C-alpha cells in the first residue's frame, strides 16, 4: 500500500480550516451552526455543523480540483486502479448519467440489460442515446433476474456493429456478478466500451472472499455507491474511468455539468474517509462482513424449508461470482411472501434492504457483528420461528419471467419532450408510453418512455397488479392510469 493512502487530504484540510475559527461572512446561512434550529443542531452536533463549509480557497473546487480535493480523488483512483476518480455527491445516479454521456455521443447506441436501474434510462434520455435491450437470465428457484451472458453480448454485437457501448449491472442487488472478464474481451474486440453499474460493489477486489472488481476484469468505467456498502454518507458515490478508450477530459466536463456548484463538503469528506478505511483495512472489513453474514446464514439455515441464495448459483444464469454478504432468503415453502416476512421483521425492529414477492434481502457489511449483534440475531430467529409455526401450504413463485417484447416507436428524449396526458390503463392500447413502469419482482421495466402499449402489455400489468406487487415509475402508483404521448 502506498504511504499516501494513509492520509485523508480533504478531511485534513477541513479540520485545519475549522481549527482556525474563521468567522464566515459567506454561505451557508446557519454560520457554523449558530443559526441552525436547536433540536436538529443538537442531534447533528456542533462539530459537524462547523465543518459544513462553503467553497473556500483552502478547500479546493470540485469543478476544477487542484488541491485537497484533487489529492483525495487521485488517491481513490490509485486505490481502485482507474486513471481518474470523480466524487459524485448526487449519488450513483449522477455517476451513471456521466458515464453514459462521457462514453457515447448523441444518437449513439448502447447495449443495456432490460433490468438496469432506472437511472440508466435517465442517462439515455439526457444523452439522447439509443438503447438496445437484452433480457437477463432468470432464476426460477428464487424468482429473480440474474445476469446477461457473454454469449448474449456477443450475439447482440454481431447483429449490430453500430453499438458503441455495453452497460452491465454487476453485481446485481442480490450479489450476483456477471462474467465481466469474458464480456470485456468481447466488447473490446468489437470496438465498443464496457461500462459497469457497480453500485453494489464498491468493496469488491479487496479480499479473495469477494468477487473481483469491474476494473480488475477490464471495464472501462464503473459507477460505485460508496454509501451502500462502505462508510460514506448517503448520496456519496464515485465514478472511476480509464483513459485507454474513454476521453478523460470529456468525463471531467460531463461530471462538472451534472454536479451542483455548491457540493456538500461533509459528503465529500466522507468519501475521502471511506477510501482511507478501505485502503488501510479493506481485507479486515471484508472478513468482518463475511463473518457477520455467516452468523446470520447459520440462524436461517437452521430452519427446514427456507431457501438461501449462495455460491452454488455461480456457473449458471450468467453468474460468475457471488457476494455472500448479501443474504437472500425465500420462505415460499412456508407459504409466506417476501413482503409478509419483511413486515414481520419490521414489527420486531428489523428493517431489510429489499423485499419482493418471494424473497427478503439482508444487506450485511463490516459494520455488523459488533456489540448487540447476538441480540439482533436472536430477534431474527424468533421471527422466523413464529413464521414457521404459522406456515401455510407451499405456494408457487408469484412471478413468471415471460414479459411482453418491448416495441420502441419513439426515442426516450422525444417521448419525454412530447405533450402528455393520462389515460385509464385499459384504454391505453395502441398509445405510446410516456413514463417508466416496473414491477418488483422481476424489476424489469415493462414499459419505458417511447414504447408502444400493447394489449399484451396491459394484460401483463393487470396480472401483476392482481398479485399486489409493488410498482415503480408511474406517476399513478396504483397504475389505474398511465401517462401517454398525445
Image: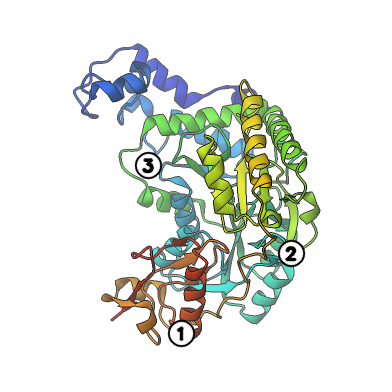
Calculate the distance from the C-alpha at mark 2 to the C-alpha at mark 3: 42 Å
Query: Where does the C terminus fall, quadrant-wise?
Result: bottom left
Total tally of numbered discs in the picture: 3
Q: Earlier in the sequence, mark 2 or mark 1?
A: 2
The N terminus: image quadrant = top right
Judging depth in this view, the residue of 345 and 361 nearest the camera is: 345
Which secondary structure lies at badge 2? loop
For disc 2, the neighbor class at 10 Å (few under 14, some 14 to 19, many from 20) is some
Residue drawn where x is 64% and y is 67% of the image: 136
CA separation in Å, label 1 and label 3: 45 Å
Which residue matches tag 3? Answer: 63
Whole-angstrom CA distance, mark 2 to mark 1, is 29 Å
Task: Indicate which disc, 1 or 3, sits on the residue closer to the N terminus.
Answer: 3
Q: Secondary structure at mark 3?
A: loop
> Which element carries disc 1, helix, strand or loop?
loop
Foreground of the two, 334 or 357: 334
Label 3: how many Cα within 10 Å (few below 14, some 14–19, many 20+): some
Q: Percent position (x, y) of residue 234?
A: 45, 38
| Cβ–Cβ under 8 Å for marks 2 and 1 | no
Choose top left, top right, bottom left or bottom right for residue 396: bottom right
Horizontal and vertical percent for residue 17?
Answer: 36, 18
Residue at numbered disc 1: 454
Residue receiving disc 2: 317
N-terminal label among 2 and 3:
3
Amino acid at each position: 500500500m502506498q504511504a499516501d493512502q494513509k492520509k485523508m487530504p480533504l478531511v485534513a484540510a477541513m479540520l485545519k480550516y475549522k481549527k482556525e475559527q474563521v468567522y464566515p461572512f459567506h454561505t451557508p446561512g446557519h454560520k457554523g451552526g449558530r443559526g441552525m434550529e436547536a433540536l436538529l443542531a443538537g442531534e447533528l452536533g456542533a462539530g459537524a455543523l462547523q465543518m459544513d463549509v462553503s467553497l473556500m480557497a483552502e478547500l479546493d473546487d470540485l469543478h476544477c480540483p487542484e488541491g485537497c480535493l484533487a489529492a483525495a480523488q487521485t488517491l481513490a483512483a490509485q486505490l481502485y486502479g482507474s486513471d481518474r476518480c470523480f466524487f459524485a455527491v448526487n449519488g450513483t445516479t449522477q455517476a451513471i448519467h456521466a458515464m453514459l454521456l462521457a462514453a457515447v455521443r448523441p444518437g449513439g447506441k448502447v447495449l443495456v440489460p432490460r433490468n438496469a436501474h432506472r437511472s440508466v434510462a435517465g442517462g439515455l434520455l439526457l444523452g439522447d442515446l439509443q438503447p438496445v435491450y437484452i433480457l437477463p437470465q432468470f432464476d426460477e428457484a428464487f424468482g429473480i433476474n440474474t445476469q446477461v451472458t457473454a454469449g448474449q453480448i456477443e450475439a447482440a454485437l454481431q447483429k449490430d456493429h453500430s453499438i458503441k457501448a455495453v452497460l452491465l449491472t454487476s453485481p446485481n442487488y442480490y450479489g450476483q456478478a456477471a462474467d465481466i472478464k469474458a464480456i470485456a474481451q468481447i466488447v473490446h474486440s468489437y470496438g465498443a466500451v464496457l461500462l459497469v453499474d457497480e453500485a453494489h460493489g464498491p468493496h469488491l477486489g479487496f479480499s479473495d472472499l469477494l468477487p473481483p472488481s469491474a476494473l480488475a476484469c477490464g471495464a472501462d468505467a464503473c459507477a460505485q455507491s460508496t454509501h451502500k456498502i462502505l462508510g460514506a454518507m448517503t448520496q456519496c458515490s464515485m465514478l472511476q474511468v480509464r483513459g485507454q478508450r474513454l476521453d478523460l477530459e470529456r468525463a471531467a466536463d460531463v461530471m462538472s455539468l451534472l454536479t451542483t456548484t455548491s457540493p456538500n463538503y461533509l459528503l465529500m469528506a466522507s468519501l475521502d474517509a471511506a477510501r482511507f478505511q478501505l485502503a488501510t483495512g479493506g481485507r479486515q472489513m471484508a472478513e468482518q462482513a463475511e463473518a457477520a453474514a455467516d452468523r446470520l446464514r447459520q440462524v436461517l439455515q437452521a430452519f427446514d424449508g427456507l431457501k438461501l441464495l449462495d455460491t452454488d448459483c455461480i456457473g449458471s444464469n450468467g453468474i460468475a461470482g457471488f457476494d455472500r454478504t448479501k443474504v437472500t432468503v425465500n420462505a415460499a415453502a412456508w407459504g409466506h411472501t417476501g413482503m409478509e416476512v419483511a413486515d414481520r421483521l419490521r414489527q420486531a425492529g428489523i428493517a431489510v434492504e429489499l423485499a419482493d414477492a418471494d424473497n427478503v434481502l439482508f444487506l450485511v457489511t463490516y459494520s455488523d457483528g459488533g456489540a448487540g449483534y447476538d441480540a439482533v440475531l436472536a430477534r431474527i430467529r424468533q421471527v422466523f420461528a413464529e413464521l414457521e409455526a404459522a406456515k401455510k401450504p407451499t405456494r408457487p413463485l408469484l412471478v413468471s419471467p415471460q414479459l411482453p417484447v418491448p416495441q420502441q416507436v419513439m426515442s426516450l428524449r422525444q417521448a419525454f419532450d412530447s405533450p402528455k396526458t393520462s389515460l385509464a390503463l385499459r384504454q391505453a392500447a395502441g398509445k405510446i408510453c410516456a413514463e417508466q413502469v416496473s414491477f418488483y419482482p422481476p424489476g424489469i421495466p415493462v414499459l419505458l418512455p417511447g414504447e408502444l402499449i400493447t394489449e399484451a402489455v396491459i394484460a401483463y400489468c393487470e396480472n401483476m397488479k392482481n398479485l399486489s406487487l409493488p410498482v415503480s415509475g408511474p406517476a399513478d402508483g396504483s397504475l389505474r392510469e398511465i401517462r401517454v404521448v398525445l
